[in-house]
Amino acid sequence: MNLELFIAKKIHFNKDGRKKVSPPAIRIATLGVALGLAIMIVSVAIVIGFKHEVSGKVIGFSSHIQISGFSNNSSFETLPIGVSDSLQTALRQNPEILYIENFATKPGILKTDNEFLGIALKGVDKNYDWSFFEKNLLVGVPPHLSDSTISNEILISHYIANKLHLEAGDQILCYFIENNIRARKFKITGIYQTNFTEYDKLFIIGDVRHVQKLNRWEIDQFSGIEVKLRDFSKLDEITENLYFDLMNCTDRYGEHYFVRSVRELNPQLFNWLDLLDMNVWVILILMAIVAGFTMISGLLIIILERTNMIGILKALGATNYSIRKVFIYISTFLVGKGMIWGNIIGILLCLLQAHFKLIKLDPDVYYIPAVPIELNFGYILILNISCLVISLLMLIGPSYLVSLIRPAKSIKFE
């Protein structure tokens, strides 16, 4: 039988199961742990949700990895690469690659009777995965692309639609300017909104064969290949492997391949997202310190209230180590109660925000209309274990106060 645990239970509970420890001590200790853990859970859920939402929008527009021409710059007027069947087969056989898509871009100008707007036409083929745009579709449907004829259907953003006063079903002229001006009439089949303003104000999505015809490219020439991975955590590793695999390869036109990850294509954005991790660590450390010190204050109060009992136990032969274990057990009960309430409060707040979007954001600044939440129960488990361990470790020092109490004086303390 664990005598220290038995004594701790007797101190903490009476026969009816009601707590006997000082109510102020309980409130101080449990409230600190509960609030600290709740804030930790909410903070981690917000940051994970925010990084997932923002990075998901970037990946939706440009995929995980792009293979393009080595001489291409950052403009949308690109030089083509030849995409052979052997290259596509080799990429599809890579077990880390989910799927690949050919694309081409071309800058142009959309014009109505009263307005005009510069855009970039992103051309895709019939095998394009529309899941990202379907998720963010406001009205209409994605363009229907087939092998038989070039489709004049396009998908535009809500920003472009508002700017040019367009609706799904409207037709619009798009002008492409090189040595001479060429125009194409497109039909709008759908309007999307991702709230990622930098891309929403720019991209329209249509048939890749328009870009190939405008640029006088061959049927196997594209601006590049978009590669979607099965596991985003392996992004850097797979990008590096593809880079070295294709570094000395050329297409049938003599163009070298250049492999870049979405991080390399958008370094400022991903550096900003990485900074959020630092903010979370600061919050976690501060909350752990707050929870630890409230537990310390609670333990000190409990020890002072039980000075007479400590003297009696020492007079009966109990060692300082045994008595310290009693109070560590009591503290564990209090930490446990605080953690239960912290989990309830934290998860409840997260669920309320996830379902009702109570806290709004400016999408022009944060790219999303409301604070995002993503509950990861693996991280919540780690937070709980860390909170318990850190709180108990911080209580070891204050528990040595027991050794300073002398039985001769403490027995008559009350």
Image (cartoon, rainbow, N blue to C red):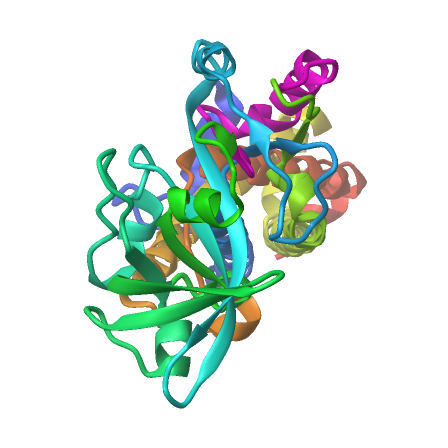
User: Which residue in the rendered view is the most extreme toward the front?
Assistant: 180
At horizontal 67% and vertical 18% (from top left) the residue drawn is 250
Answer above or below: position of 183 versus 212.
below
Across and down, in percent, residue 229 comes to 48, 26
Q: Nearer the viewer, residue 22 or 207?
A: 207
Q: Residue at x 25, y 45 (%)?
A: 16
In front of the other: 171 or 280: 171
Which quadrant: the C terminus? bottom right
Q: Residue at x 44, y 24 (%)?
A: 230
Q: Is residue 234 magenta?
A: yes
Does residue 388 show up magenta in the picture? no
Q: Is residue 48 visible?
A: no
**Residue 171 x/y as whole percent:** 26, 71
The percent position of residue 398, horizontal first and vertical second, equals 74, 44
Q: Quadrant of residue 155?
A: bottom left
Q: Nearer the viewer, residue 225 or 185?
A: 185
Could you say which quadrant of the image residue 180 lies in?
A: bottom right
Residue sitting nearer the eye, 109 or 26 = 109
The magenta stretch is 222-251
